[in-house]
Image (spheres, helix red, strand yellow):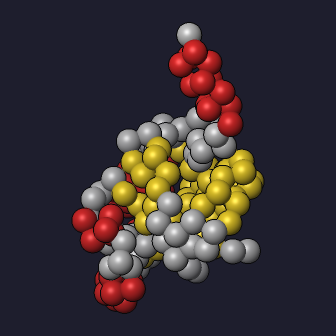
Amino acid sequence: MKLLVIAIMLSLALPNVDAQISKAEIVATGLTCSMCSNAINKQLKSLTEVDSVSIDLNTNTFLVHLNKESNVSPRTLKERVEKAGFFVGSMIISMSFENVEVTDNYKLEKDGFSIVFVETKAKTLNGENKAKIMDRGFVTQKEFKKLSKSLSKYPTYLSGSEDDYHVKVIVP
């Protein structure tokens, strides 16, 4: 009984770390025409977790709004872009937080995957925050080469696990 009370008290004291991805800004590479963007659009919209997709043809950016309570991973979105025959050049995800203290190399476990904060000073995240995914396949090859040198200090980055997403918080 005493352990149950302690467990309940600890769960109430911990911050809400259910950081659901609400949006993803995906810059696709290799597009040459509006038919290309249409192929990616169809692939993204076919996901049940996707509420809507808007496209900026000038920058080849797809703004993907996800349904509330969806548990889609960045890898699923990346795979849809690749299924259409293209690549992800950049992916920025938006997540909501409620008083979550993050530091460099802080790892947030999510439904089947992890978010690892890199190059991050200690701060408290509240509300919606944007973070750029820094892993291979989520940035261009050229950028990945540069990043792999500076981010090699993170063991999870070097492991190359597809279930760990290394993100850098974008300060507005």
Foreground residue among 94 and 32 = 94
Taking the spot 33% from the left edge, 64% from the top edge, the residue there is 156
Out of 13 and 52, give the one closest to the viewer: 13
Could you say which quadrant of the image residue 54 lies in?
bottom right
Along the viewing direction, whichever of 56 and 141 lies nearer the viewer:
141
Q: In the drawing, does residue 18 fall left or right of residue 114?
A: right
Please tell me how many numbered marks the rendered image carries: 0
Residue in front for this viewpoint, 23 or 155: 155
Say if residue 75 shows up in the picture: yes
Residue 44 visible within the image = no
Q: Is residue 78 above or below residue 61?
A: above
| Residue sticking out furthest to the left | 159
Q: Quadrant of residue 148?
A: bottom left
x and y percent of residue 38 in the render?
A: 46, 61
Q: Position of residue 164 (x, y in %)?
A: 37, 57
Q: Residue shown at 60%/44% (left/top)?
A: 17
Q: Classify residue 141 as left or right of residue 19.
A: left
Image spot of residue 36 (x, y percent): 41, 68
Hey, which residue is sitting farthest top in the picture?
Answer: 1
The residue shown at (49%, 71%) is 118
Q: Give the position of the N terminus as an image quadrant.
A: top right
- Residue drawn at (60%, 61%), measured in percent from left and top? 102
Which quarter of the rendering shows the C terminus? bottom right
Quarter where residue 124 is shown: bottom right
Residue lying furthest front in this view? 2
